[in-house]
Image: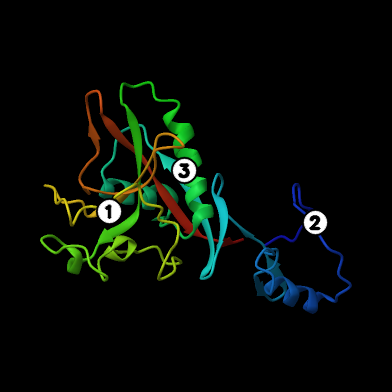
């Protein structure tokens, strides 16, 4: 391991502190926006970084690196999980808060502006599987109503994530069952006025025609790496 000197390229503000090394590290630990020193192995401090083209987000359970990953072909949900793991060593990401939702939504809207292959819309997979206790013919109830209809494998997602901003009247897989069932979650953001989470069939990948769509990618996440 090599220690090197560096300074921030961009930042939103700073404060001067007259602290010793140990006190400086303690102060950084207590500030959620400070991440220069997270791990110490004698005799070096290690610097955490996200992989290239991933964006860092802060969650209660730890820092999370997030990327909207795209493919040349349309993918179903399981193919997307495999692609995330094989390409980036990651896990299909959930959406912890509105900041993460806005990040993915903005990326999706820009992606949909570039469609040139005949599809009407590009959709994207996000983490979430319908609970076995919230399957049709069961109807919506206090225990099966919105985000709590689903389980999540994203390891740093909170027990009640606020980032799943639903499209109007969604999820509707219990009230309007389909075949195949809508047991997975996807992001549909074509424009600023049509943007949100929907419950989708896990085996969907594309549909042709005037209202055709392609599942063009997925939210992929990795935990902050130490180098």
The residue lying at 17 percent from left, 55 percent from top is 175
Kindly report which numbered mark, 2 or 3, lies closer to the viewer in this rendering.
3
Q: Secondary structure at mark 3?
A: helix
Mark 3–mark 1 Cα distance, whole angstroms, equals 18 Å
Q: Position of residue 90 (x, y in %)?
A: 42, 55
Vertical relation: 81 (above or below) 136: above
Kindly report which numbered mark, 2 or 1, lies closer to the viewer in this rendering.
1
Give the mark nearer the N terminus: 3 vs 1. Answer: 3
Q: Position of residue 78 (x, y in %)?
A: 26, 50
Give the mark nearer the N terminus: 2 vs 1. Answer: 2
- Residue 105 is labelled as 3
Kindly report which numbered mark, 3 or 1, lies closer to the viewer in this rendering.
1
**Mark 2, residues whose alpha carbon is within 10 Å: few (<14), some, or many (≥20)?**
few
Residue 148, by quadrant, is bottom left
- Image quadrant occupied by the C terminus: bottom right
Of the pair 35 and 48, the residue shown nearer to us: 35
Residue corresponding to mark 1: 171
Q: Secondary structure at mark 1?
A: loop
Q: Position of residue 36 (x, y in %)?
A: 70, 63
The residue lying at 77 percent from left, 57 percent from top is 4
Q: Are marks 3 and 1 in contact (CB under 8 Å)?
A: no
Residue corresponding to mark 2: 5
């Amino acid at each position: 391991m090599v220690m090197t000197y560096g300074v921030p390229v961009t930042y939103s503000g700073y404060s001067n502190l007259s602290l010793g090394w140990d006190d400086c590290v303690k102060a950084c630990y207590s500030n959620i926006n400070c991440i220069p020193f997270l791990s110490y192995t004698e005799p070096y401090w290690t610097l955490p970084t996200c992989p290239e083209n991933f964006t860092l987000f802060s969650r209660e359970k730890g820092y999370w690196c997030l990327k909207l990953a795209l493919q040349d072909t349309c993918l179903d949900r399981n193919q997307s999980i495999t692609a995330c793991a094989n390409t980036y060593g990651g896990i299909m990401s959930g959406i912890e808060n509105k900041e993460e939702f806005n990040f993915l939504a903005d990326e999706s809207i820009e992606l949909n502006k570039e469609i040139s292959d005949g599809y009407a819309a590009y959709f994207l997979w996000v983490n979430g599987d319908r609970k076995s206790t919230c399957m049709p013919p069961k109807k919506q109830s206090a225990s099966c109503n919105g985000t709590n209809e689903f389980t999540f494998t994203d390891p740093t997602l909170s027990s009640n994530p606020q980032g799943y901003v639903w499209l109007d009247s969604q999820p509707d897989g219990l009230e309007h069952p389909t075949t195949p069932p809508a047991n997975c979650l996807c992001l549909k953001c074509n424009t600023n006025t049509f943007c949100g989470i929907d419950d989708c069939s896990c085996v969907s990948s594309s549909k042709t025609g005037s209202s055709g769509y392609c599942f063009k990618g997925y939210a992929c996440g990795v935990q902050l790496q130490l180098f």
